[in-house]
Image (spheres, grey):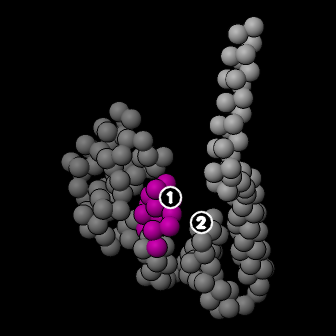
């Protein structure tokens, strides 16, 4: 009997404590519940808006490419270089490089603009540097080439290509000993 009474008293005290806690903290509890519901909703809204913006930028790129006036195309593509969408920026760059095939300095300046924005992933930065190294290949010094091409990174997706570009560079500059050493490294990897 006393055991039952103890249980009822304990349960009553627990209920009173919970009710008292709720009365004191009800605004915090309601706020927390609202946050738990709103955060995923807001995140999904943000993702939807971002997806829509990306699709609009891709649509702009497509409209520009379908145009026939090369000068207008070039101006619009230069604006798209500054796009927040990495893919659109790279597509615009490739199109600009195609339009300005004979103008190496202009092509290099486009790549420099993208490298200076620092909005790209490490992989795309390495890609852009390799692209630039190919453009400056004939006029670059060894130091410039080594600054552009990352030969130290063992996990780079462009490691073998980087070694081969430097090998070709050394051959073109008639630095056969360096080329031979580099060829050994290429064969080891």
Q: Nearer the viewer, residue 83 or 9?
A: 9
Position of 7 relative to 50 (above/below): above
Q: Does dot 1 land on a helix, a strand or a loop?
A: loop
Position of 157 relative to 5 (above/below): below
Q: Main secondary structure of the magenta part?
A: helix
| Quadrant (top left/top right/bottom left/bottom right) for the C terminus | top left
**Magenta region:** 117-132
Residue 137 painted magenta: no
**Location of mark 2 (residue):** 86
Relative image position of residue 108 (x, y in whole percent) = 44, 76
Position of 83 relative to 160 (above/below): below
Q: Nearer the viewer, residue 114 or 17?
A: 17
**Location of mark 1 (residue):** 121
Residue 122 painted magenta: yes
Is 141 left or right of 29, judged from the image as shown? left
Position of 183 relative to 118 (above/below): above
Real-space CA distance between mark 1 and mark 2, rounded to the nearest whole angstrom? 9 Å
- Tell me what residue is drawn at x 74 percent, y 78 percent: 60
**Cβ–Cβ below 8 Å for labels 1 and 2?**
yes
Is 105 left or right of 83, judged from the image as shown? left
Q: Is residue 131 visible?
A: no
Relative image position of residue 81 (x, y in whole percent) = 57, 77
- Tell me what residue is drawn at x 28 percent, y 49 percent: 179
Q: Few, some or many C-alpha atoms within 10 Å of disc 2 (few <14, some 14-19, many ≥20)?
A: some
Q: Quadrant of residue 6?
A: top right
- Tell me what residue is drawn at x 32 percent, y 42 percent: 183
Relative image position of residue 89 (x, y in whole percent) = 60, 71
């Amino acid at each position: 009997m006393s055991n039952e009474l103890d249980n009822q008293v304990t349960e009553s005290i627990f209920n009173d404590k919970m009710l008292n806690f709720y009365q004191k903290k009800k605004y915090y509890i309601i706020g927390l519940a609202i946050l738990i519901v709103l955060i995923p909703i807001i995140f999904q809204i943000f993702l939807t808006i971002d997806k829509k913006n990306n699709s609009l930028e891709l649509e702009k790129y497509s409209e520009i490419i379908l145009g026939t006036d090369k000068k207008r195309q070039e101006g619009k593509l230069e604006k798209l270089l500054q796009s927040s969408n990495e893919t659109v920026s790279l597509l615009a760059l490739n199109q600009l490089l195609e339009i300005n095939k004979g103008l190496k300095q202009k092509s290099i300046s486009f790549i420099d603009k993208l490298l200076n924005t620092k909005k790209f992933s490490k992989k795309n930065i390495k890609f852009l540097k390799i692209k630039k190294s190919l453009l400056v290949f004939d006029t670059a010094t060894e130091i410039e080439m080594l600054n552009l091409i990352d030969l130290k990174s063992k996990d780079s997706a462009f490691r073998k290509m980087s070694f081969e570009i430097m090998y070709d560079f050394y051959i073109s500059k008639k630095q056969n000993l360096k080329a031979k050493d580099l060829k050994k490294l290429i064969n080891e990897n």
